[in-house]
């Protein structure tokens, strides 16, 4: 009987009617922030991988054309300095040779013709980005308004990025969001009880 009177008081009703919607709002906002954070982190990883693949492909033009494996290894070692990059591969189509640096999944490396060059591939906690290595012929200025010659495809480059850093940042973000939401609810409960 005393418990029934305790929950029927105005103070307890005010506490329930203020904390229940606030809790629901906190849960909805926390889930939205977690999902949007995941999306932003994944977009950043995709952007980093795409830019790294395109930059290394344009920088590797001469090394792939001349099949200079030492230069390709030096270029590859410099790309491995990017925090999420854990491997890359250069493929020379005319010589049918390749140079691999770091860790790569052999199933993804086998045939890039099965994949689109602009879209990343996810396999075993790694994102793989392909980019063509092309030889762009010099522009002709003979006042002819015809088409310029098409660039020759020399080969391709594959850059592998691990998602371990992404998952670590995601876990840290979840922890921070849950901590802030819990503290907000505790402060709101304390203030509601003080009224």
Image: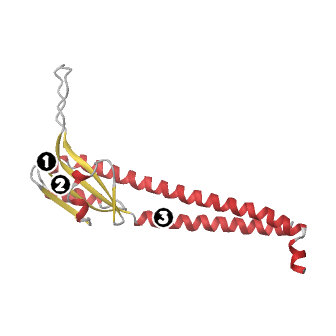
Q: Residues within 10 Å of mark 2 (few under 14, many from 20)?
A: many
Secondary structure beneath label 2: strand
Residue 87, position in %: x, y?
27, 62
Residue 167, position in %: x, y?
45, 65
Q: Earlier in the sequence, mark 2 or mark 3?
A: 2
- Left or right of 171 in this view: 91: left
Q: Quadrant of the C terminus?
A: bottom right
Q: Earlier in the sequence, mark 1 or mark 3?
A: 1
Question: Vertical placement of 156 versus 20: above or below?
Answer: above
State the residue lying farthest toward the left: 95
Which residue corresponds to mark 2?
Answer: 91
Cα–Cα span, label 2 and label 1: 10 Å
- Left or right of 98 in this view: 37: right
Q: Earlier in the sequence, mark 2 or mark 1?
A: 1
- Left or right of 8 in this view: 56: left
Question: Vertical placement of 118 versus 176: above or below?
Answer: above
- Report which quarter residue 100 is drawn in: bottom left
Q: In the depicted view, which residue is nearer to us: 16 or 162?
A: 16
Which residue corresponds to mark 3?
Answer: 169
Secondary structure beneath label 3: helix
Cα–Cα span, label 2 and label 3: 33 Å
Which residue corresponds to mark 1?
Answer: 65
> Residue visible at 11% across and 54% down?
96
Q: Residues within 10 Å of mark 1 (few under 14, many from 20)?
A: some
- Report which quarter residue 162 is drawn in: bottom left
């Amino acid at each position: 009987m005393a418990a029934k009177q305790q929950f029927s008081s105005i103070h307890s009703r005010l506490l329930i009617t203020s904390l229940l919607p606030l809790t629901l709002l906190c849960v909805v906002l926390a889930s939205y922030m977690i999902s949007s954070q995941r999306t932003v982190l994944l977009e950043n990883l995709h952007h980093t991988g795409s830019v790294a693949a395109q930059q290394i492909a344009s920088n590797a033009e001469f090394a792939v054309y001349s099949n200079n494996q030492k230069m390709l290894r030096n270029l590859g070692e410099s790309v491995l300095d990017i925090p999420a990059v854990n491997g890359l591969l250069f493929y020379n189509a005319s010589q049918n040779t390749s140079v691999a640096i770091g860790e790569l999944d052999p199933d993804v490396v086998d045939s890039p013709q099965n994949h689109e060059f602009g879209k990343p591939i996810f396999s075993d906690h790694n994102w793989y980005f392909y980019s063509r290595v092309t030889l762009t012929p010099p522009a002709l200025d003979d006042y002819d308004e015809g088409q310029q010659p098409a660039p020759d495809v020399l080969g391709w480059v594959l850059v592998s990025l691990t998602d371990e850093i992404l998952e670590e940042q995601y876990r840290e973000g979840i922890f921070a969001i849950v901590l802030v939401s819990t503290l907000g609810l505790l402060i709101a409960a304390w203030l509601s009880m003080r009224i």
